[in-house]
Amino acid sequence: MKNGDYILTCNRINIDELLEMKKTIGLLLNAGAAVHIFEGDREVSVEFLDNVIESYMDAERFLEEID
C-alpha cells in the first residue's frame, strides 16, 4: 500500500455503509491503528462521521413519526 492510498471508502448517502465504516474505524482504533477520515479532500474527525450518522437517524425517526 502506498502512503496516502484509501483503504476503505463508502457512499455518504448510504446509512448502512456509514455504519459499517464507523464499526471498521472503531476496530482499527481499538487495535492501535492511525486512522484518517476524509470527506472529499478534507480530513474530518470521527465526531464528524458520528454527526452525519446521527443526522440520518434523526431524519429517519422524523419520517417515521409523520407517517
Image (cartoon, rainbow, N blue to C red):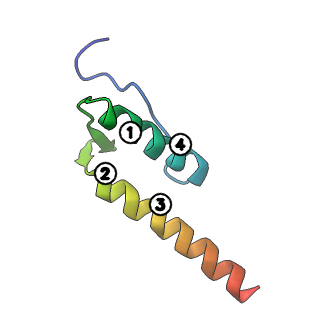
Q: Earlier in the sequence, mark 4 or mark 1?
A: 4
Toward the right, the furthest residue is 67
Which residue lies at the image location 54% right of the left edge and 54% below the top edge? 13
Tell me: 64 left or right of 31. right
- Spatial distance from mark 2 to mark 4, Cα to Cα? 13 Å
Tell me: 30 left or right of 66. left
Residue 28 quadrant: top left
Residue 24 coordinates in the image, percent (x, y): 45, 36
- Spatial distance from mark 4 to mark 1, Cα to Cα? 9 Å
The disc labelled 2 sits on which kind of residue? Answer: Val
Which residue lies at the image location 38% right of the left edge and 54% below the top edge? 49
Residue 14 visible here? no
Residue 17 coordinates in the image, percent (x, y): 56, 44
Tell me: 36 left or right of 66. left
Q: Secondary structure at mark 2?
A: helix
Q: Which residue is mark 3?
A: 53
**Nearest the eye: 49 or 31:** 31
